[in-house]
Amino acid sequence: MTADLLEQLSQDLEVLSQHLRAGLDEFGTLYSYLEGQRGGGTLLLHAPYGEALPVLQALNGLAFRGRILLALDTSYLSPTLEGVNLSGPAQAPLLHLLKRVRPDRLLLAFPGKGLGLFYPGGKETQEGWQPLEASGEPLRLQVEAPTGLRYGEVRWYEPWETPPLAVDLPVGEGPYWGSVGRSLGIPTYGVGLVDLRASLEAILRLW
C-alpha cells in the first residue's frame, strides 16, 4: 500500500511542480506554495490528500495577501504495524510541518461546513472515540508513512478553543487535530469542506 501511495504522490508532485513550488516531506505530506498579493503572512491550509482536487479548485483564482502553504495529509491513508486503520489524521506529520514552517495561522479542512472553533477533547480506543475522562486506554500505534518513515501515534487529543472571527459563517465543533496547532500557540481554525471556497473568501478578506 505504501509503495502504491508513494508512486501516486510522486506523480502528483511532478504535476504540481510544473505550476507551483512543491515538495514531499518525510512524513508523506505533499505541499505546495501559493503566492498572493503583498502584505499578510503565511497561512498553512491543511487538508486530506483525498480532497486535493476540490481544495485546489477552491483556491484557484482566490484573492489573498501573503502566502498559502497547502499541505495535503496522507497519514490517515497510511498503514499501522498493528493493522489498525487510522480514522483521521495523525499528530506527528502536522506537528513536524508546523515546527518547520512556523505559519502565522493554521486552517484545517475537515468534513462539515463553516468554521470549527473548538474541540472538547477525545481519545480513540479499541471501542472507538470516547471522552478523555472515559475508561479505556488510547490506541498506541506505529504508523508507516508512504516514504517508509515509521513514527508513533497516541490517539489522545486535548481540548482546544480559538476566538471567533468576524465572518458570517456557521460555527461549531472543529477537528480534533486542532490541538496540535494550539499547543504551539498558532491561531487555529477548522474550515469545512462544504462550500469551502465561500468560507475561504470570507476568512481571507480578514487576513
Image (tube, grey):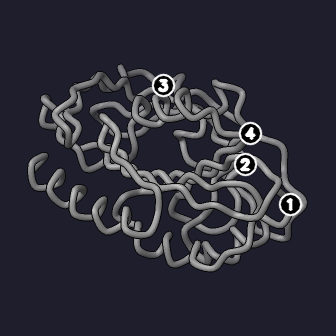
Task: Point out the frontmost of discs 3 and 2.
Answer: 2
Residue designated by label 3: 134
- Where residue 145 appears, as percent x and y from the top left, is 23, 37
CA–CA distance in space, label 4 to label 3: 29 Å
As drawn, is 133 to the left or to the right of 162? left
Mark 4 residue crowding within 10 angstroms, few (<14) / some (14–19) / many (20+): some
Q: Is residue 103 above or below residue 164?
A: above
Q: Secondary structure at mark 2?
A: strand
Q: Which residue is mark 2?
A: 117
Is the Cβ of the residue at disc 3 closer than 8 Å to that at disc 1?
Answer: no
The residue drawn where x is 40% and y is 67% is 51
Q: Please tell me which residue lies in front, 171 or 203.
A: 203
Which of these two is toward me, 50 or 11? 11
- Element assignment for label 3: loop
For marks 4 and 3, the one nearer the N-term is 3
Provide residue 118's location: percent of width, then percent of height. 69, 43
Q: Residue at x 61, y 72 (%)?
A: 196
Q: Quadrant of residue 198?
A: bottom right
Which amino acid type corresponds to the residue marked 1 in the rendered image?
Answer: Leu
Q: Report x, y in % for residue 44.
A: 60, 48
Residue located beneath label 4 in the image: 187
First in sequence: mark 3 vs mark 2: 2
User: Within 10 Å of the Cα at label 3, are there few (<14), some (14-19), or many (20+) other Cα atoms?
Assistant: few
Among numbered discs 1 and 2, the one appearing first in the sequence? 2
